[in-house]
Amino acid sequence: METAVTLEHVSKRFPGVQALSGVSLEIAAGSCHALCGENGAGKSTLGKILAGLQAPDGGQVFVFGREVQFSSPHDALAAGIAMVHQELAFCENMSVAENLCLGSIPTRGGFVDREEMRNRASAQLAETGTMLDVDGRLGELSIGNRQMVQIAAAVGGGARIIVFDEPTSSLSQAEADRLYALIGRLKTRGVTCIFVSHRMPEIFALCDTVSVLRDGGHVATRPTSELTEAQLVELMIGRPLAEYLPVASDGPPGNEVLRAEALTSPGLFTDVSLSLRAGEVVGLAGLMGAGRSEVAAAIFGLDPESVGRIFVKGKAERIADPQDAIRLGIGFAPEDRKRQGLVLSQSALHNASLPTLNRLSRFSWINMAKERAQTSTLFNRLRVRTPSLDAVVAGLSGGNQQKVVLAKWLAAKPEVLILDEPTRGVDVGAKAEIHALIGELAAQGTAVLVISSELPEVLRLADRIIVLREGRVAGELARAAATQSALLRLMAGVA
């Protein structure tokens, strides 16, 4: 079989960290080849080198037998390589059509040919099975739909090699299923798919071969048919991990700490009521667009248009902004960590201490020794991989960024913690640690509201599951009665 990509002793170093160390592997043409490993193992760095976003410090890269040296993504595209990024990389203030035609905007008579641009964009979206208004502003779309636009751009560009970096992390199950079918069609056309993912089921369903990276080095390349999920996880983390979704506690919950009554936000959700008790993990499930994240944002004071009543420990409270929510003991780790959960230009240290600066300061002066000690303890507890506490958080891997978001709320010690997609884009080892942390917080009396698109995660973690459909509460299931089938029926409105 022809080889599409050959890497020979590829290395890449960033300040304070060796991202790749002498990686050598081959990827067969027309295959779907998985790259697996823990966060920080070097998977995304390898993909960015292939896509021309970064240059290796050493080693050689061959594409269809020809050595290449890319200085930009344009060079990679010219060689037939495109990339679908985990973190969205488009211009949110521009239309869908403009984003899809960036770099090759059609013109006629010296002016932009908008009709041709719309036609091209519609054709690219149709290739992925996605129907969107191409004149709509990209920033107004859901994260899932923005991801589908990015996938359409890579596929519609006619690339012979496509790197998918966590492509399903922001997609609903229906959108993910469309992507799986699309990858099948691409393979039949001879397109090589390099698939970076932490989701075991999709790796085994889609990929012919898997290469495992650990700490920047190449551990193994094996056919997926010769591996079990447990064996793959052990290769990734270097230790056995038989169970990474802990069973939720069967202990009785404590007193009610938060209750929302008739929460409504025009066009987003209507008449949503829910309650959280101390030591209880409550799941919030629903299809993409059901209103899960919007309800969480309203409880945390991020939606000025929302109305309804919120009670904290039985007392009616007005939460006008996040400062009110934090004062009342509510923490919120949002779905979009880059835009809403972190200050990317600041250090990991400063991000982790943001909600607790009042505790760490006296007379407006921050006790920096105390700040460092607090952050260091939390980073050790969460196994945050960072060159130093002062490393800029934008340079950390997605999984480590997520751990920084969690660290700052652990430092705040909230009585209610809302986690929106807490394990999106993290590896199985980090997922295990986050799940164990959720169980630990609940055991200590924290009320935890978990929003997740992964039904197995919700089913195993939650004591109760509230299902939203089209912005309304469709039902509630106790853990003993909850099954994936029952949840899907409530989510889809099937009797």
Image: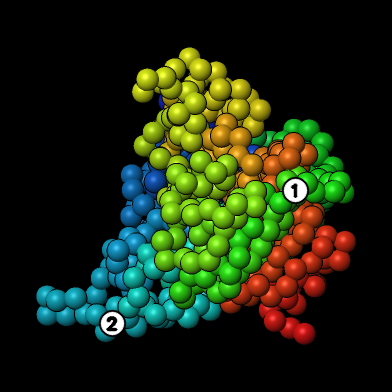
Quadrant in which the N terminus is drawn = bottom right
Dot 2 and dot 1 residues touching (CB under 8 Å): no
Q: Amino acid at mark 1?
A: Asn
- Amino acid identity at mark 2: Glu
List x then y, in percent, for residue 147. 48, 63
Residue nearest the viewer, comparing 228 with 278:
278
Circle 2 crowding by C-alpha within 10 Å: few under 14, some 14–19, many from 20 = some
Q: Quadrant of residue 472?
A: bottom right
Q: Position of residue 179 (x, y in %)?
A: 59, 69
Nearest the viewer among 31 and 341 is 341
Taking the image as shown, residue 206 lies to the left or right of residue 373, namely right
Residue lying farthest to the front in this orientation: 315
Mark 2 lies on residue: 116
**In-front residue for pair 195/489:** 489
Q: Earlier in the sequence, mark 2 or mark 1?
A: 2
Question: Residue 194's x, y, as percent?
Answer: 57, 55
Mark linked to residue 255? 1
Residue drawn at the location 64% of the way across and 58% of the way down: 259
- Relative depth, front residue between 92 and 106: 92
Is there any visible trace of residue 61 in the rendered image? no
Give the structural element (helix, strand or loop) at label 2. Answer: helix
Q: Nearer the viewer, mark 2 or mark 1?
A: 1
Place of residue 33 in the rendered image (x, y in percent of width and height, measured from the top left)? 63, 54
